[in-house]
């Protein structure tokens, strides 16, 4: 799951990115409003975190421009402390949530997860896929009999992407876009490796290979 962070304070951007990556997200950072607005229109992100005080183009304008183009990207805005007017303006412009600076990274993570849960209509960090569940907080599979199978970071990111787009054909390129940020070394062969890991855990038939096209994750076991 790939997130966009638009924040001009380098140190804060670095800290937030590191924490989000640890939590299993791929994160791209834009340092000004123009670059951020452009990236946000790329439709590879599940959510954007937008600082309102940005060089070149204010965050509020970025948000308004997205919404004017029917871009419904879920957005959390970062506001200066105690500026209720900014929050009201942010919501009017189409923000889904806000956080006042300075904030605890744990609160940002909780808000990101809550917003993603609302968007994807699941609750408590649990995604259901036929006969098993994915616990996104523990990054583990919960089987029907209640066994817990831990996943590596990459397996977790791939499986979450599959479940959120179940029964859809996903090309390797799309999977790479969801799993890696723009700074990562990309090697599409690794997708094959992780798909095989997941097959070992979930059964061979759960993920179908379409040669030259990609993969389909099946919600219901065959
Ligand atoms: Ca700023």
Image: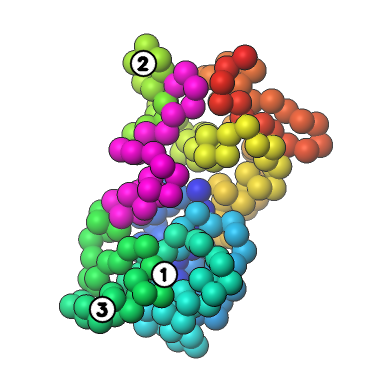
- Within 8 Å: ligand 1 and the Cβ of disc 3? no
Pointer 2 local density, CA inside 10 Å: few below 14, some 14–19, many at least 20: few
For mark 3, does the 10 Å Cα neighbourhood hold few (<14), some (14 to 19), or many (20 or more) residues? Answer: some
* Residue situated furthest right in the rendering: 212
- Any part of residue 7 in sight: no
Residue for badge 1? 94
In front of the other: 10 or 142? 142
Residue at point 25%, 56% (across, down): 107
Mark 2 vs 3, N-terminal side: 3
Residue 113 in view of the camera: yes
Q: Nearer the viewer, mark 1 or mark 3?
A: 1
Q: Residue at x 69, y 25 (%)?
A: 208
**Residue on which the image places disc 2:** 147
Task: Note whether 11 is above or below 17 in the view shown.
Answer: below
Gap between marks 1 and 3, in whole Å?
A: 18 Å
Query: Residue 103 placed where, x, y %?
Result: 23, 65
Give whichever of discs 2 and 1 has the lower sequence position: 1
Identify the residue at horizontal 78%, vertical 38% (top origin). Answer: 213
Mark 2 and mark 3 residues within 8 Å of each other at the beta carbon = no
Quarter of the C terminus within the rendering: top right
Q: Are marks 2 and 1 in contact (CB under 8 Å)?
A: no
Q: Secondary structure at mark 3?
A: loop
Q: Dividing the picture into quarters, in which one does residue 188 lie?
A: top right
| In the image, residue 173 lies in the stretch drawn in magenta | no
* C-alpha distance separating marks 2 and 1: 41 Å
Front residue of 128 and 139? 128
């Amino acid at each position: 799951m790939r997130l966009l962070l638009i924040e001009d304070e380098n140190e804060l951007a670095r800290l937030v990115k590191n924490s989000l990556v640890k939590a299993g997200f791929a994160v791209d950072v834009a340092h000004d409003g123009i670059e951020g607005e452009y990236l946000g229109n790329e439709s590879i992100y599940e959510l954007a975190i937008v600082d309102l005080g940005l060089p070149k183009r204010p965050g509020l304008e970025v948000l308004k421009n997205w919404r004017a183009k029917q871009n419904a990207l879920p957005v959390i805005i970062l506001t200066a402390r105690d500026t209720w007017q900014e929050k009201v303006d942010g919501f009017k412009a189409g923000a889904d949530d806000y956080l006042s600076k300075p904030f605890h990274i744990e609160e940002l993570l909780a808000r990101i997860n809550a917003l993603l849960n609302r968007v994807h209509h699941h609750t408590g960090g649990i995604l259901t896929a036929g006969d098993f569940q994915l616990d996104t907080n523990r990054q583990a599979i919960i089987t029907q009999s209640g066994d817990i199978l831990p996943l590596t970071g990459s397996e977790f990111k791939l499986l979450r992407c599959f479940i959120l787009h179940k029964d859809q054909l996903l090309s390797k390129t799309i999977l790479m876009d969801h799993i890696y940020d723009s700074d990562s070394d990309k090697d599409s062969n690794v997708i094959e490796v992780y798909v095989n890991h997941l097959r070992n855990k979930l059964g061979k038939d759960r993920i179908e290979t379409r040669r030259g096209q990609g993969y389909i994750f099946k919600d219901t076991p065959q």
